[in-house]
Image (cartoon, rainbow, N blue to C red):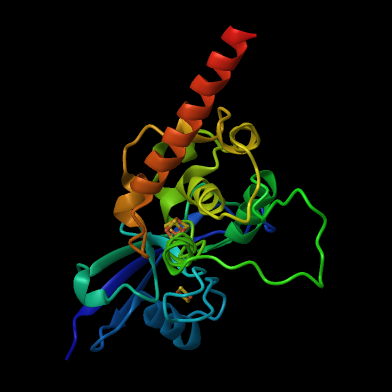
Amino acid sequence: MGRNLRLSIFRYRSNRSKIEPRMQEYTIEEEPHMTIYIVLTKLRENQDPSLLFDFSCRAGICGSCAILINGRPKLGCKTLTETLPEEIVLKPLPTFKLIGDLSVDSGAWFREVNIRLESWIHQREPFDPSSEEERMSNKTALEIFESERCIECGCCIAACVPANMREDFIGAAGIYHVGRFMIDPRDQRDEAEYFKVVGMEAGIVTCTGLMECDNYCPQEIPLQEQIAYVRRRMLRSLFGWRRKSARA
Ligand code: SF4
Ligand code: FES
């Protein structure tokens, strides 16, 4: 017989503002290889059909099941109960708009940040559908692939102290997205154009290097490496401008 898990789960519906936020207690018997996603599904099926939480792929790919598990941002579908004590506290990720209970609207946050960062390939010439495909080396393609691994779960944002203090901060995920375009030879933005989207105060300047993003990214992306790369590029461009304006 498995352990008796005692769960304390945050409950609140933002569209029913007369009901105060509260923690609700549940118990469930632990099963082998049980994940937090399975716990929540069983609770909803057998004890409380009103429980709200997000999931889609159940395989650590879509990023939608990220929640605070005993205070730490993690994916519910990848977190085994056997790695946790018997008492488990579940809360929604902070910094994102709360929909209800454990469900937050991280999609809206990422959409807005990606628009602000202009997360698409910028080219000077108009698109010519009859032109030949542009080739790139395997090394560059692999580097770009490595910079495309973010599943937009929001764990790095939830774990980041500056992101919790400043809601317009683009966070590690935003900086990581910009770095992906910086290494893409098809993106023809110059340093001044990149500076406009990532060099501002709500960008790279707000990162204080606490590295919590690195600690909690379920994809184990080396976020601090990418942040250091973007920071170096932005510093170089800043000194370049100063030299140019000194010469003028
Ligand atoms: Fe999640 Fe990592 Fe992407 Fe941040 S960088 S949103 S922690 S996958
Ligand atoms: Fe998709 Fe967990 S359900 S990452």
Horizontal side of residue 127 vs 214, given as left or right: right
Horizontal side of residue 83 vs 95, given as left or right: left
Q: Which quadrant is home to the C terminus?
A: top right
Residue 94 at x, y = what percent? 48, 49
Query: Within the image, what quadrant is residue 194 found in?
Result: top right
Q: Which quadrant is home to the N terminus?
A: bottom left
Query: Which one is nearer the viewer's eye here, 115 or 238?
Result: 238
Residue 92 at x, y = what percent? 47, 58
Q: Residue furthest bottom?
A: 1
* Residue shown at 59% from the left, 9% from the top: 247
Q: Is residue 71 visible in this depiction of the protein?
A: no
Query: Which one is nearer the viewer's eye here, 242 or 108?
Result: 242
Query: Which one is nearer the viewer's eye here, 207 or 155?
Result: 207
Query: Which one is nearer the viewer's eye here, 100 or 229?
Result: 229
Quadrant for ligand 1 reads bottom left
Question: Vertical placement of 193 versus 70: above or below?
Answer: above
Query: Within the image, what quadrant is residue 75 found in?
Result: bottom left
Residue 98 at x, y = what percent? 59, 55
Residue 53 at x, y = what percent? 52, 71
Question: Vertical placement of 200 versus 229: above or below?
Answer: above
* Residue shown at 62% from the left, 56% from the top: 186
Q: Is residue 211 visible in this depiction of the protein?
A: yes
Horizontal side of residue 119 vs 225, given as left or right: right
* Residue shown at 39% from the left, 83% from the top: 38
- Looking at the image, how many numbered discs can be counted on the residues? 0
* Residue shown at 42% from the left, 56% from the top: 155
